[in-house]
Amino acid sequence: MAQTWLVVGLGNPGPRYAATRHNVGQMVVDELAARRGESFRDHRVRGQGSGAQVVETWVRPGGDKIVLAKPTSFMNVSGTPVASLARFYSVPAERIVLVHDELDIPFDTIKLKVGGGHGGHNGIRDVARALATPDFPRVRVGIGRPPGRQDPADWVLAPFGAAERPNLPVLVSDAADAVEQLIEEGLVAAQQKHHAPRP
C-alpha cells in the first residue's frame, strides 16, 4: 500500500544563502522536484503559512507519495516547520528524510543513516527536538571541513569553491538518487550503493 514520505532539504532562506555549502540539502530537493517537472509553492494551512515550501508528488508513478519540503526559516530553527508538516501529512519520524550538509564527511561523498547524534549540526538538533526523537532517516551530503584554521561557521555559509563546483551537479544528482533508493528499496540497499567507493 502506498505511503507518504516527507523529504526535507535543510538550508537557510533567501538568495544570499542559496549557493552556500549549508544549503546543499535544498539543492537536492530542488533536483528531485525538477526531475518531476514540479515547482515549490508556499504551504498554507487554513490560510496561514506553515514556514515551508512544498511539492506534493510521487517517487514514481504508482509508487509512494513524497512531499518535498524546504523550510523558509533559518537552519537553526528548522524543527517547527518540519514538525508542522509531519502533523499535517500524518508522516511518522521513520518516513521523514532529512537531507543536509555534513562537515565530517569529505566533499563528493554521501552517507545515509537513521538516528544518532546531531554532530553539532544545529538544524538536525532542532528537528530532533521538535519531533521528540532523533530516529529519522538522514541523507548526509559531504562538504568536508575547512582548510587550516578557517572557522567552520564561515565555511558552511560560503559558496562552494572553484575546485568543487564542477563536481557539485553530480553530487547533488547522486544524493537525489540516494533519497529515491532509500524510499523504494530501504536503508541498507541505499547504503550499499552510495557508501561504496566511487569508480
Image (spheres, rainbow, N blue to C red):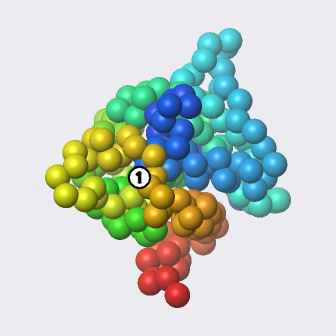
Task: Give the farthest residue toward the top.
Answer: 47
Q: Is residue 40 left or right of residue 139?
A: right
Q: Is residue 65 left or right of residue 134?
A: right
Tell me where residue 111 appears, x and y as whole percent.
42, 67
Which element type, helix, strand or loop, lies under badge 1?
strand
Name the residue carrying label 1.
101
Tell me where residue 73 appears, x and y as whole percent.
47, 26
Q: Residue at 46%, 64% (x, y): give it.
A: 163
Q: Residue at 56%, 31% (x, y): give it.
A: 15
In this rendering, the answer to whether 137 lies above or below 197 is above
Q: Residue at 60%, 17% (x, y): give it.
A: 49
Frontmost residue, 83 versus 13: 13
Packing grade of label 1 (10 A; few <14, some 14-19, many >=20) is: many
Count of numbered marks: 1
**Kind of residue at badge 1:** Asp
Tell me where residue 179 appears, x and y as whole percent.
57, 61
Where residue 157 sits, quadrant-wise, is: top left
Frontmost residue, 43 versus 105: 105
Q: Residue at 44%, 55% (x, y): give it.
A: 161
User: Is residue 86 in view from this perspective?
Assistant: no
Q: Quadrant of the N terminus?
A: bottom right
In this rendering, the answer to whether 145 lies above or below 190 is above
User: Is residue 196 in view from this perspective?
Assistant: yes
